[in-house]
Image (cartoon, rainbow, N blue to C red):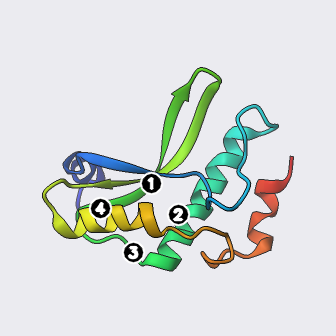
Amino acid sequence: MNNPHIILAKLDDYINIGSSPVEEDCVQIGEINYMSRSLIECALFLKAIRNKLGTEPVGARLMTKRFTHDFGTYHEVVCMFQTGNEKAMEYAFKCESEAPTTWKEGGIEESELDIVRRK
């Protein structure tokens, strides 16, 4: 079995995709249970992207990344990719430009969103 840390080390760039589809409200820093709700929201967005665009090719990986900001730590979905790997780079840019714009477009059921919307 491949060591995931070695595989990730080969992915030397990433594109930010966001924390939720652009036409949907997202969990905001400072809201009750932000950390857990935002991680669930990102996991659902990962699922929605894969539902629409398919799984990542070799050399690309969708994942949740933590960022720091003046107002606190937040999470976003990113597509890590290996520069020089044409298929991986194409997939990453496709995620940026063609990610689902609504939960419905990504095949996410309302019932799956209940925990994210709970405050």
Q: Secondary structure at mark 1?
A: strand
Image-based side of 17 in relation to 85, left or right: right
* Residue at the image point whose x is 35% and y is 60% from the top: 61
What separation in Å lies between label 4 and label 3 (alpha carbons)? Answer: 9 Å
Q: Closer to the camera, 47 or 4? A: 47
Say which label, 1 or 3, has the lower sequence index. 3
Between the C-alphas of marks 2 and 1, the distance is 7 Å
Circle 1 sits on which residue?
63
Provide the residue designation for mark 4.
60
Q: Amino acid at mark 3?
A: Thr
Q: Which comes sooner in the sequence, label 4 or label 2?
A: 2
With respect to residue 60, does 33 lie above or below? above
Q: Earlier in the sequence, mark 4 or mark 3?
A: 3
Q: Residue at x 23, y 54 (%)?
A: 7
> In the shown orientation, is residue 93 left or right of residue 106?
left
At label 4, the amino acid type is Ala
Is residue 87 positioned above or below 7 on the image?
below
User: Label 2 sits on what residue type?
Assistant: Leu
Marks 2/1 in contact by CB < 8 Å: the verdict is yes
Instruction: State the residue position of label 3.
Output: 55
Give the residue pinned by disc 2. Answer: 46
Label count reads: 4
> Residue 65 vs residue 36: left or right?
left
Q: Are marks 2 and 3 in contact (CB under 8 Å)?
A: no
Q: CA distance from mark 4 to mark 1?
A: 10 Å
